[in-house]
Image: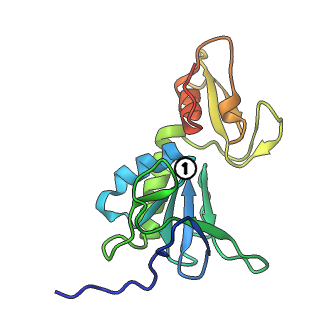
Amino acid sequence: MTTRALPWTPPNTEDVEALPVGKWWDAVRTAPIVGQRALKALGDKTGAVIQDKHGPLYWLVAVGSATSWHLRQVRVFARLTDEITYLGIPPVSWTEGPSTHWRVPVSADHYLTDAFKLWGALAEADRAEYGRAPEGRQLCYRCQLPTDEPIPVEVEDGRSDVGKVTYACPPHAPLYSKRWPRSLTSAAAAEHEGRRPR
């Protein structure tokens, strides 16, 4: 039995090391609530995954394979023409939290995640956690600026099938509160930021 050599392995250092994105891989960052669901959906089809100390998950994908993605609470880190982006890579031995660690360690079986499969898992997780994405931009209830990533924070029941929906941009979603209990969607938004729903 032969062991496959990986084109890249994490540094064997004593602390997190900043490495350039776009050299060996690009990275896809997800909000914790979306990332956890996508990780479960991918199962053994996932590649290596880093979880930082604040909760977001980072998948490593082939360079250039995810540059046109547009999903709520998902960011693609790729090399840009005029600047270099760095990702904090934990030592290979860091496989448990609470600090930044390898949620799925790099190995011959878990290296890069297939971008098409990852997109499918993240799109499904996005719909499950935040509901169907509205058409076009929506105004954030707090800053009153249009957002391309509207998160529903309140759905008021109406007499028709569609009630009034209040949206927030990602930074303001966890700050939404009303005098009445949160809806399921606003509870998901609160959990996204690690807060308990009211």
Image quadrant holding the C terminus, namely: top right
Q: Relative to the observer, which residue lies in front, 24 or 186?
A: 24
Compared with residue 179, is residue 117 higher up or lower down, i.e. above or below? below
On the image, the x and y values in percent for residue 70 come to 62, 58
Q: Which residue is mark 1?
A: 53
Q: How many marks?
A: 1
Q: Is residue 17 visible?
A: yes
Which residue is drawn at the image coordinates 61% and 64% (left, top)?
A: 76
Q: Relative to the observer, which residue lies in front, 54 or 39?
A: 54
Compared with residue 191, is residue 109 higher up or lower down, i.e. above or below? below
Which residue is drawn at the image coordinates 42% and 70% (left, top)?
A: 114
On the image, the x and y values in percent for residue 7 come to 44, 86
Model colouring: rainbow
Which residue is drawn at the image coordinates 67% and 34% (left, top)?
A: 173
Image quadrant holding the N terminus, namely: bottom left
Q: Quadrant of residue 110?
A: bottom left
> Which residue ends up furthest to the front in the rendered image?
14
On the image, the x and y values in percent for residue 49 come to 44, 62
Q: Is residue 122 left or right of residue 26?
A: left
Compared with residue 62, is residue 171 higher up or lower down, i.e. above or below? above
Type of residue at label 1? Lys
On the image, the x and y values in percent for residue 118 come to 45, 62
Q: Is residue 112 left or right of residue 69?
A: left
Q: Is residue 107 left or right of residue 19?
A: left
Which residue is drawn at the image coordinates 49% and 76% (left, top)?
A: 11
